[in-house]
Image (tube, rainbow, N blue to C red):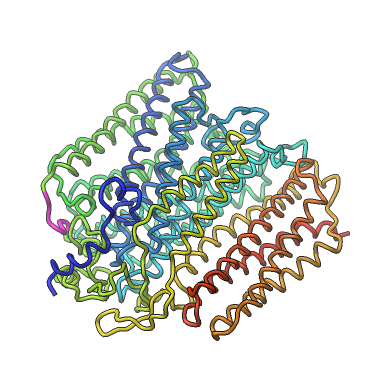
Amino acid sequence: MTALRLHKALYPIWRNDPGWKGVLTTVNNNTIGNMFILGATGMFLAGGILAMLIRAQLASPRSAFMGPEIYNQIFTMHGTIMMFLFAIPFFEALTVFLLPGMLGTRDLAFPRLSSYGFWCYMIGSTIMIVALVAGVAPDGGWFMYPPLSSSAYSSGINTDIWLLGISFIEISAIGAAVEVVVTVLRYRAVGMSLDKLPIFAWYMLVVAVMILTAFPPMILGSLILELERAFDMPFFQAEHGGDSLLWQHLFWLFGHPEVYIIFLPAAGVISMVLPVMARTTLLGYGWVVAAAISLAVLSFGLWVHHMFTTGIPHMGLAFFSAVSTLVAVPTGVQIFAWIGTLWKGRPEMHLPMLWILGFFVTFVMGGLTGVMVAMVPFDWQAHDSYFVVAHLHYVLIGGYVFPMIAGIYYWMPVLTGRKRFFRMGETAFWLVMVGFHGTFLLLHWAGLLGMRRRIDTVEAGSGWESINLLASISGFVLAIGFGLVILDVAVNAFVAVRGPRNPWKAGTLEWATPIPGPSYNVASIPVISSRYPLHDNPDLPVQIARGEGFLAWPDRNRRETLAVSISRGEPEFISVFPKNTIVPFVMAVVTSVMFMAPVFKWYWLMFIAAAGVTVLALVWAWANGSRRDEGLLDAGRGVSLPPHTEVAYKPGWWGSLFLLLADSVLFGSLLFGYAFLWTVAPNWPPPRILQPGILGPVLALAGVALASSGIRLGDRAIREDGAPWRGLLASLAGLAALGAAAATVFAGTTYNAHAYDATLWVIAGYVIFHAGLAGLMVLFLLCRIGTGYVSARRFGDARVVRLWIDYAVLTAALGLGAAWLPGVLP
């Protein structure tokens, strides 16, 4: 088979719709990745402009450049944009674009989820920028500490925009994390076992799991703070049993792992680019993977080191200080692995290598100051000073932005199909290095001299005037340097000549396709036997293009790719991807209305939008599946495999599993907050404790028994080609009983009387929501059975519903038990 003939067969199936319609309906990872990169770059420009406004304000004493109200919005939005709208979305964008090609598959696991996440990000980011232009941007800092962010001190809509806008934008991060985990585990080239994964895929797998476990605490904190602002539920009001430290715990349970969520993708880029620049392979592959996993685990034990000055008990101070120091070990393992790689190779000083060397210098300096602030006595002196600001920028710019620029230059041929011709990059690098160190080395000094962070002016005679003037000048040099980087990349992307397929002579699969990659990524799913398949078999790109791998000829005229076993990479089933659709875009728009309507107290519109999201989700799910049994299908190379509709644990089950991981962390954070308030907060115990009585527990026990047993009976009946109606209806009745049991909590409490009551209302609401959601899924499954989408072969839908029902039952038992237990204890 010729490569051109195969391309002509695949292209019509996988191509985007023409014109602007294609932008709105595309579900292709290459297109979405490109749009994502452009959007995140735009946010970087916006955040950089705000940074320059900050430096202009602080360049001279008693500056009248802007007043404190505007300054508070500027510095809040600078931090918000850089942390939430640039850093995480940018590596997500790069991952969406690169990962399928790197793994040798045709797209990410859930293409529509990629589209939905992108549009949530773009709409949410636009809302934040419009709020800034309109003068109603958040102004309480990117950390939004209560009680300053409570309604008593921030009465406008500024804070509401942050709380609801950021929660909406994080849908994108959660969706991307689910995509990455399922893609890395199930969608790979044949033979790509876990020990043969590209190192970047390992890093992104670790990061995706971190996102699923780190973001939910902040989402919970944002939602309950909004409930306090909107309905006076006193979660953070000390006079009513709340505690503002609860926000700090929830925020930093997210905030410190986020530092490593940002660093690890950059480390993955370095681990991919550095060996190619050194003309060798990565030293200590297994050690680097272990270090990344260790760093991820340790990062969740560090959050309190942001709270050393809040009165933490001495034992806690010692523990969190020790763990904060311990993270230097896995970080050091990675750095020494990179140094060893350089030592055994033959490094060539290309532009990506220049940025990596800049990373080494800058990140090591930032790491040393990080060890300093991990020491409690020093942290007490430097806390809330510009020393911490400077340390943060050394770690985030030096440890993240520099490697990402190296990655952009390294993968530019894959992104654009062109080789670099114009040479502004080297000039830009030196401007950035001089400007960066000139700015933030000086700010370390200012912090040690006592300059506080978040101040809008510098007083004459403070001793900080000259430092800030020089830092501001250096900051503008830094901005010029970054501007030249963006200009250099843009000019080379649109003007430079076409380049060869693999100019770096790299060994990983993203270089095995034509550049830029076609919409289907690989013409056939390759078979590999090492971590560097292009080094082992230089003819592999031609073999892939000629269809010598799996799923070469699209005789079924649909978008198909291969799913493999998790550990060994053996073929397991054929996954059928959806076609282009506008549903993700429309759903993102309606979701944005649901999140932003409460800003203006339009709760009626919020409920209408929520109903719209529900309808669109049902339309989304209905499009999956098949009404006929297909049996084993030809997958190529003499192998026959079932379609994903005829396996027990189809892709939707895996996606639900990891989505429920994030959901369970949110629920665990809610129980943590309940326990924290009960044991630490002032004005506890509450004036009145809920008495469970008889009705609630009886309903709960009946609900647990019916819901869990009913879905199992229904599942078994489907697989045995029997009648599942009785089991599913019993499960539906059980879920209704669980919801009724949770509703009894409302009758015994007053939502705004005390933090105890408010927390019980949220726990009960959580149980009711998940019981209702699972009940809706049962009804959906009944409709699918009635219309022929479910059979003894096609029972995967029932397994997905069973997973959600089991989760609803478990969280109901834990949540209602926690609510009722104090009332029955002596």
Q: Which residue occupies 56% across, 47% down?
A: 218
Residue 696 in sight = yes
**In front of the other: 365 or 570:** 570
Depicted 790 relative to depicted 147: above or below: below
Q: Which residue occupies 75% across, 62% down?
A: 817
Magenta region, residue range:
498-504
Figure quadrant of the C terminus? bottom right
Q: Quadrant of residue 189?
A: bottom left
Q: Which residue occupies 30% across, 75% down?
A: 190
Residue 528 in sight = no
**In front of the other: 404 or 435:** 404
Horizontal relation, residue 214 to residue 177: left or right? right
- Residue 503 in the image: x percent, y percent? 15, 56
- Residue 338 in the image: x percent, y percent? 31, 57
Q: Quadrant of residue 345?
A: bottom left
Horizontal relation, residue 316 to residue 643: left or right? right
Which residue ends up furthest to the right in the rendered image?
826
Tell me the chief SS of the magenta region: loop
